[in-house]
Amino acid sequence: MWYQFLNVFFFVFHTAFTLFNMVGWAFRSTRKWHLITIFLTAFSWFVLGIWYGWGYCFCTDWHWAVRRKLGFADESNSYIHFLILKLTGINLSEKLVGYGTLIIFLLSLFLSAFLNWKDRYKRQMS
């Protein structure tokens, strides 16, 4: 029962976190939080990734551990690939999904940093 709860929790939390990383920069009220979440993601992918492999995500790692305990044998190495496969049934190339994820991540990082800087500059000027 506990693992079933954790599986649903990770599915909801990690998906919401991912969606927020994609669009949180667009709303002035969430930009500071977005900058934090995008940097947490970058830390996981690029710093922890030094030891665990590029793109390592501790949420994915924990979710996969829960799913293994429940007897699932997920074939995806990427959470985004897993989501696309589970939500649409489309089995895209993991390489294609990885490149798309990286492009969206870098675009979101740039937009978040730029808009947070712009908001801060406007506050200082007024």
Image (cartoon, rainbow, N blue to C red):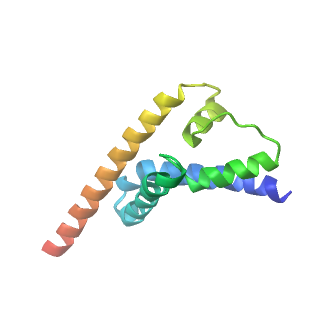
In this rendering, is residue 54 above or below 112?
above
Question: Quarter of the image containing the N terminus?
Answer: bottom right
| Callout count | 0
Residue visible at 68% across and 51% down? 63
Q: Quadrant of residue 36?
A: bottom left
Name the residue at the front extreme: 51
Asked if one can make out residue 126 in the rendered structure from this viewpoint, the answer is: no
Name the residue at the right extreme: 1
Residue visible at 21% across and 61% down? 118
Asked if one can make out residue 28 in the rendered structure from this viewpoint, the answer is: yes
As drawn, is 85 to the left or to the right of 102? right
Between 50 and 12, which is closer to the camera in this rendering?
50
Between 69 and 13, which is closer to the camera in this rendering?
69
As drawn, is 50 to the left or to the right of 2? left
x and y, in percent, of residue 113 in the image:
29, 58
Name the residue at the left extreme: 125
